[in-house]
Amino acid sequence: MLSLLPERIDRILLLGAHCDDIAIGAGGSLIELCRAHPGVTVSALVLTGGGSLREEEERAALAAFCPGAQLEVAVLDLPDGRVPTRWERAKLAIEELRTLGEPDIIFAPSPHDAHQDHRTLAKLVPTVFRDHLTLGYEILKWESDLAQPTVYLPLAEPVLREKVAKLHEHYGSQRDRSWFDAETFGGLARIRGVQCHARYAEAFHASKLVLGVAPLTGVDHPVD
């Protein structure tokens, strides 16, 4: 397995249909990336939950999951479960993000996600960000829609514990849900860790990656 380590990350874009989607799918990765790249700019757009307790939870949570980052958060008030019927407003919001700069990494829902809100957002992303590295995160839920991922970010055990603790600390409105517990988050992370020779990991789906080859210096190349 080949590991690719980005030398520099200046801007990260986070996209979620609901408050807590981003933290559940990529919370550990955000902690790792923000600590590895102090001062990184993180822009987040969430389509639903605006003006409610959920927005308050989301803002506090993303601040905790993005330590040391320059964080910008926008939470819209599209109706939960009806994002496909608000397609135009969702796309306009994503297009506004496009004017803010070039993200080095985009975290967004996976295109095969069975939830209609997640899937709609995932389909919108490449219509606006055509030439960017987009990683589709996983959200374990009742629908059996998990697919084999293609990209892994290993997590140290303390980071996984920190992720789970922050999820429970900041998303109090979700604690009574049957799937919102440490076993769910840790179990999936353990499986993904096994698949990339790590203890724990978060995994993502990438539709396209372009590899660049740096020019070699001090090497004599044969002449035809």
Image: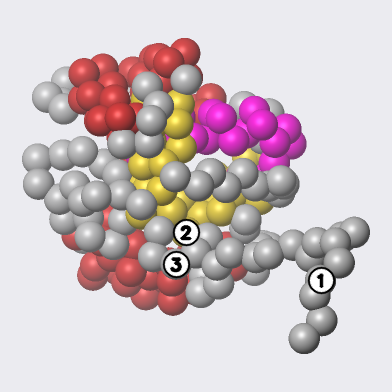
Q: Position of residue 143 (x, y in %)?
A: 9, 46
Q: Which mark is residue 208?
A: 3
Q: Nearer the viewer, residue 134 or 101?
A: 134
Q: Which mark is residue 221?
A: 1
The Cα atoms of the two marked residues, 3 and 2, are separated by 8 Å
* Pointer 2 residue: 134
Camera-side residue of 221 and 29: 221
Q: Position of residue 83 (x, y in %)?
A: 26, 62
Pick whichever, 223 or 45, lies toward us. 223
Q: Which mark is residue 142?
A: none
Instruction: Specify start and end residues of the magenta stretch as a single range.
Output: 24-44
Residue 129, image x, y percentages: 52, 70
Q: Amino acid at mark 2?
A: Thr
In the rendered image, which quarter is residue 202 located in? Answer: top left
Look at label 1 and name its amino acid: His
Q: CA distance from mark 3 to mark 1?
A: 31 Å
Compared to residue 133, the image places residue 16 above or below, namely above
**Residue 63 visible to an observer of this rendering:** no
Position of the C terminus by quadrant: bottom right
**Disc 2 to disc 1: CB gap under 8 Å:** no
- Most extreme residue toward the right is 218
Q: Determine whether 93 is above or below 184 in the image.
A: below
* Magenta stretch holds residue 215: no
Q: Is residue 88 left or right of residue 99?
A: left
The answer to which quarter of the image holds residue 191 is top left
